[in-house]
Image (cartoon, rainbow, N blue to C red):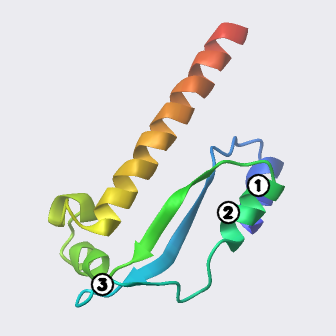
Amino acid sequence: LKAVSMFERLSVPVLGVVENMSYFVCPHCGQRADIFGHGLVREVAARLGLEFLGEIPLDPALREAADRGLPAVEAAPDSPVAQAIMAIAQRVAAKASVQHFALQSSG
């Protein structure tokens, strides 16, 4: 996770880690396939003392929505990728709120 080192050098707080293209869900049978393995990003996040915020599945619908200029959560709100993005966004918002409150309280 080279980005973590870069952000630390720039004194940018890291809220957590998201695993992109984490798995693929077959559109025909619904079976999950861990094409690139499973668990390594979560392990690295733990080793670095960072929260693992979630997994975003590999989904052709995400690319198709992006090609049309639409956010995945708008194009297909019930899709696994949209649900994953919304769950991660909620975790990020909560962590950002806590950090903001902590900064306000200490300053």
Q: Earlier in the sequence, mark 2 or mark 3?
A: 2
Q: Which residue is denoted by mark 2 in the rendering?
A: 42
Label 1 residue SS: helix
- Of 73 and 5, the residue lying toward us: 73
Give the residue type that dot 2 points to. Arg
Residue at x-position 25% and y-position 79% = 61
The image position of residue 92, as x and y in percent, is 50, 42
Please tell me how crowded label 2 is: few (under 14), some (14-19), or many (20+) other residues with Cα within 10 Å. Answer: some
Give the residue type that dot 3 points to. Pro
Residue 104 position (above or below residue 32): above
Q: Is residue 45 left or right of residue 86?
A: right
Q: Which residue is denoted by mark 3 in the rendering?
A: 60
The image position of residue 50, as x and y in percent, is 72, 49
| Mark 1 and mark 3: Cα distance apart in space | 29 Å
Q: Which residue is denoted by mark 1 in the rendering?
A: 46
| Mark 1 and mark 2: Cα distance apart in space | 6 Å
Label 2 residue SS: helix
- Of 6 and 88, the residue lying toward us: 88
Q: Is residue 57 left or right of residue 44?
A: left
Label 3 residue SS: helix
Is there CB contact under 8 Å for labels 1 and 3? no
Q: Earlier in the sequence, mark 1 or mark 3?
A: 1
Work out which quarter of the rendered image holds the N terminus and state it.
bottom right
Q: Which mark is residue 6?
A: none
The image position of residue 31, as x and y in percent, is 36, 84
